[in-house]
């Protein structure tokens, strides 16, 4: 999936955010510590670029919140948890996907 999303030209913001999320997860499976960090940073960059393009997209904020809530604190990627949580609570009615709605509800309960 990472390769397919990375190869897509002119990625919409949602593709970039999902690519970033997959990259941050993939960093757990990379052997070298330097490669782990670089892979994580690539993912973080893709998520942030997507949100910069579409800051009012609830799904993108959900992706970032999911990653930040599950990222070790030493990586320093937890600064938007409160902001994204509040944004999602106020705007989750704008999500059309039942699967995303279900996952948002689950994430907000944690």
Image (spheres, rainbow, N blue to C red):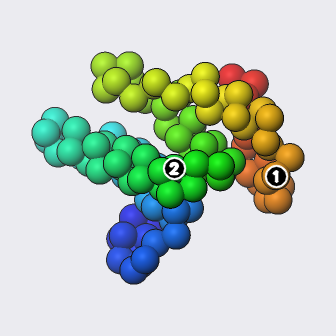
Q: Is residue 102 left or right of residue 75?
A: right
Q: Where, quadrant-wise, is the C terminus in this rendering? A: top right
- Residue 6 location (% of width, % of height): 36, 70
Q: What residue is shown at x 39% (from left), y 64% (from top)? A: 2
> Which residue is disc 1 drawn over?
94
Q: What residue is shown at x 46% (from left), y 61% (from top)? A: 16
Q: What residue is shown at x 65% (from left), y 49% (from top)? A: 56
Element class at badge 1: helix
- Residue 103 location (% of width, % of height): 73, 43
Q: Is residue 109 left or right of residue 50?
A: right
Q: Is residue 46 left or right of residue 60?
A: left
- Residue 75 location (% of width, % of height): 31, 26
Residue 57 vs 110, above or below: the answer is: below
Q: Using a 10 Å C-alpha cutoff, classify the residue at mark 1 as few (fewer than 14 neighbours), some (14 to 19) or many (20 or more).
A: few
Q: What residue is shown at x 56% (from left), y 26% (from top)? A: 81
Q: Using a 10 Å C-alpha cutoff, classify the residue at mark 2 as few (fewer than 14 neighbours), some (14 to 19) or many (20 or more).
A: many
**First-in-chain label (1 vs 2):** 2
Q: How many marks?
A: 2
> Which residue is disc 2 drawn over?
51
Q: Where, quadrant-wise, is the N terminus in this rendering? A: bottom left
- Residue 46 location (% of width, % of height): 39, 54
Q: Is residue 25 left or right of residue 41?
A: right
Determine the residue located farthest toward the top in the rendered image.
73
Element class at badge 2: helix
């Amino acid at each position: 999936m990472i390769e397919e999303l990375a190869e897509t030209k002119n990625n919409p913001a949602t593709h970039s955010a999902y690519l970033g999320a997959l990259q941050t997860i993939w960093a757990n499976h990379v052997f070298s510590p330097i490669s782990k960090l670089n892979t994580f940073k690539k993912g973080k960059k893709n998520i942030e670029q997507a949100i910069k393009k579409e800051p009012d997209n609830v799904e993108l904020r959900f992706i970032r919140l999911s990653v930040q809530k599950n990222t070790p604190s030493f990586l320093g990627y937890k600064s938007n948890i409160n902001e994204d949580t509040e944004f999602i609570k106020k705007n989750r009615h704008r999500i059309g996907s039942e699967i995303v709605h279900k996952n948002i509800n689950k994430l907000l309960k944690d």
